[in-house]
């Protein structure tokens, strides 16, 4: 793909209604952090860059009381982020050395302090951030981990420069919110590794430690405290990975600990919530092939809602719209439109930035079609077809999204598939069961049934494209990353339906994954623990490595060397099994990379490898 774009992210509105955000290039160079910078734009003016220099500047948070902006940067030591402050166009920092890397920060409501969520060396990034080990030692030196590293919460007083640790009774903190009286709500777990997040709970942190106030049935995200300080909301829903919760609102009385769902059951797939007053909550989330946002009263009445077949928010993992008293602000992208800061004051969206001006003119010519088909069990499934035209029937590439609790939507580069379209291939992007945007029941339909109904959804989608006369049998390929890589590996091991498979950061052994990976995904998707015989049997039954049949699908494996979400052993095992059976297979391991391939040269090679593989086995599109 020849189009490279700048990506705005992490947008927050300051007290004057200005957008404060980061801007990152699409890729990074070897040996460098992502060269992200902090920007600000006032509606009606041009954006202004607030930081520059080496390193990565990210996570800007405007002060609630004045024009200061706190942000994070690793400009002093690559990979180790510390807090900085922008005040009167000058940068102060690092403000402190918290003994780890700061992942998020938040202001106290009086603007006197910032709270820091600090991860110690030896933990891992979330899969959505690349699942790389958190290491910032000098290359070549040993990494020494003394005891079990945790995520800690600290308070930094700006005037006195005092750094104080918040007592958490030895628990690890994943997310937190600070109330008007200093009350802290946090998502915590006993297990500090990624496994612990899957069974995290909500706690109130006080001078004497943590007090659990809510133990959820599913995963939770985004605690937010009301301006009055007496109530809070949290999002709860099934999530395969940290930062992927798309769920329902739950209202919590902080005095009585009573909790209740907020809104009708159809108000789900939400990824962000914020108090707009003591009685109104703004929300954002997924809907179909796009996003939704609106406002709901604490009585459960939806006061306003807007839906659009577009991406509204910082990226493909979370929808988020900043709602002001007379404006809405977000990062918006859609089919043919690259991401930009956008403002809506009741009418259409107005772009406030032009970081990607001219990008649309460099897109390949293609048509985006929304499709629906019926799975064998009668469930209605949807997907996007990217069609560059050309002879029909012709070759087709099926791109399966990861998660599975994610989705394909109408964005600038749906599913990262435009490089296939640019080469002339038609592309099918299915939102199989397990995807978000279709409601709680649709998302949970994958739980307990991996490579079951979801696999049938994908195959029936291929049937539908063939019935439309667009796909030539024998010239159909499949690819995907993470869970999409798992489905591609399942296709390669068990089916002759596809002429070629490209497995990116995939899973081949769900049982071994429970011990090999850094999270509890296998037990989550199996809906049970591996101590149960039925769970172990299901994981073996649905693992590609244990189901390699006499199929002959040529399979390419592309994997990051340091991936902690799906370690490279998941690729090498199935690669070896296929090679021993005389199958056409190839393995490419990218050094230094995690769950996502990010370095410029590696991304270019990944595209070349995948396109070359499909050209060899599907034939040229024309």
Image (cartoon, grey):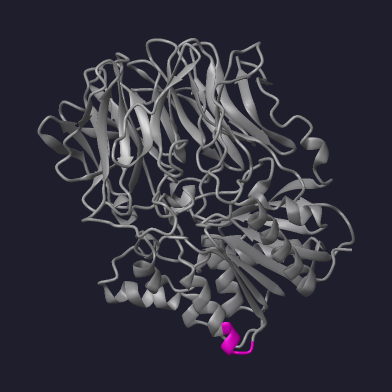
How many labels, in total? 0
Question: Where does residue 432 sit, x and y in percent of width and height?
Answer: 56, 57
What segment is highlighted magenta in the picture?
Answer: 578-582
Which residue is more in the foreground, 511 or 77? 77
Camera-nearest residue between 315 and 590: 590
Residue 474 visible in the snapshot: no
Look at 48% across and 33% down and name the residue there: 58
Task: Name the residue at 51% across, 64% down.
Answer: 561
Q: As drawn, is 154 to the left or to the right of 255? A: right
**Residue 246 in sight:** yes
Seen in the picture, residue 264 relative to 141 is either above or below; the reply is above
Residue 313 image-quadrant placement = top right
Q: Position of residue 504 (x, y in %)?
A: 58, 63
Question: Is residue 289 shown above or below 11?
Answer: below
Quarter of the rendering containing residue 141:
bottom left
Is 271 left or right of 251, judged from the image as shown?
Answer: right
Up/down of 610 relative to 49, above or below: below
Q: In screen coordinates, is 290 left or right of 545? A: right
Q: Position of residue 15 (x, y in %)?
A: 45, 12
Quarter of the C terminus within the rendering: bottom right
The residue that appears at 42% across and 71% down in the rendered structure is 510
Q: Residue at x 49, y 25 (%)?
A: 294
Residue 240 falls inside the magenta stretch: no
Would you say the magenta stretch is mainly helix, strand or loop? helix
- Residue 80 x %, y %: 40, 42
């Amino acid at each position: 793909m020849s189009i490279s774009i700048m990506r705005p992210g992490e947008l927050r509105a300051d007290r004057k209604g200005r957008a404060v955000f980061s801007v990152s290039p699409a890729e990074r160079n070897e040996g460098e952090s992502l060269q992200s910078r902090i920007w600000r734009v006032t509606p009606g003016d041009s954006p202004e860059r607030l930081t520059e220099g080496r390193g990565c500047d990210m996570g800007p948070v405007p002060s609630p009381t004045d024009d200061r902006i706190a942000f994070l940067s690793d400009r002093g030591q690559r990979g180790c982020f510390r807090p900085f402050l922008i005040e009167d166009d000058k940068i102060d920092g690092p403000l402190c050395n918290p003994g780890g890397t700061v992942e998020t920060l938040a202001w106290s409501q009086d603007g006197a302090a910032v709270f820091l969520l600090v991860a110690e060396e030896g933990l891992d990034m979330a899969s959505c951030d690349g699942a790389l080990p958190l290491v910032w030692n000098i290359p070549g030196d040993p990494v020494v981990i003394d005891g079990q590293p945790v995520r800690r919460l600290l308070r930094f007083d700006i005037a006195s420069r005092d750094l104080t640790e918040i007592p958490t009774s030895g628990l690890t903190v994943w997310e937190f919110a600070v109330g008007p009286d200093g009350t802290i709500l946090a998502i915590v777990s006993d297990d500090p590794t990624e496994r612990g997040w899957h069974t995290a709970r909500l706690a109130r942190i006080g001078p004497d430690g943590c007090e659990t106030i809510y133990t959820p049935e599913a995963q939770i995200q985004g605690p937010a405290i009301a301006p009055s300080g007496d109530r809070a909301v949290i999002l709860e829903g099934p999530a395969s990975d940290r930062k992927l919760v798309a769920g329902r609102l739950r209202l919590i009385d902080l005095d009585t600990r009573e909790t209740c769902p907020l809104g009708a059951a159809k108000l789900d797939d939400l990824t962000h919530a914020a108090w707009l007053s003591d009685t109104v909550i703004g929300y954002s989330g997924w809907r179909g092939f796009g996003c939704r946002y609106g406002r709901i009263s604490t009585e459960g009445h939806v006061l306003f809602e807007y839906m659009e077949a577009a991406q509204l928010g910082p990226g493909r993992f979370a929808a988020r719209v900043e709602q002001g008293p007379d404006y809405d602000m977000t990062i918006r992208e859609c089919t043919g439109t690259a991401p930009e800061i956008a403002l809506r004051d009741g009418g259409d969206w107005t772009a406030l930035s032009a970081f990607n001006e001219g990008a649309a003119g460099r897109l390949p010519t293609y048509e985006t079609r929304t499709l629906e088909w019926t799975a064998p069990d009668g469930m209605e499934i949807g997907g996007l077809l990217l069609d560059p035209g050309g002879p029909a029937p012709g070759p087709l590439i099926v791109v399966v999204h990861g998660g599975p609790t994610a989705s394909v939507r109408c964005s600038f580069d749906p599913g990262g598939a435009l490089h296939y379209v640019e080469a002339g291939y038609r592309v099918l992007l299915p939102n199989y069961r397990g995807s978000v945007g279709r409601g709680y029941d649709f998302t949970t339909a994958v739980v307990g049934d991996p490579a079951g109904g979801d696999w049938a959804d994908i195959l029936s989608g291929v049937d539908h494209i063939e019935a439309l006369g667009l796909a030539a049998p024998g010239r159909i390929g499949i690819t995907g990353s993470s869970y999409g890589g798992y489905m591609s590996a399942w296709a390669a091991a068990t089916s002759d339906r596809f002429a070629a498979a490209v497995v990116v950061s995939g899973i081949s052994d769900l049982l071994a994954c429970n011990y090999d990976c850094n999270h509890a995904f296998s037990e989550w998707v199996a809906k049970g623990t591996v101590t149960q015989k039925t769970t172990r049997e299901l994981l073996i039954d649905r693992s590609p490595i244990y189901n390699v049949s006499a199929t002959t699908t040529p399979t390419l494996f592309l994997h990051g060397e340091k991936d902690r979400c799906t370690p490279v052993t998941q690729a090498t095992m199935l690669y070896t099994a296929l090679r021993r059976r005389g199958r056409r297979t190839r393995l490419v391991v990218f050094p230094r990379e995690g769950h996502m391939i990010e370095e410029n040269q590696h991304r270019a090679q990944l595209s070349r490898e995948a396109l070359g593989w499909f050209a060899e086995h599907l034939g040229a599109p024309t």
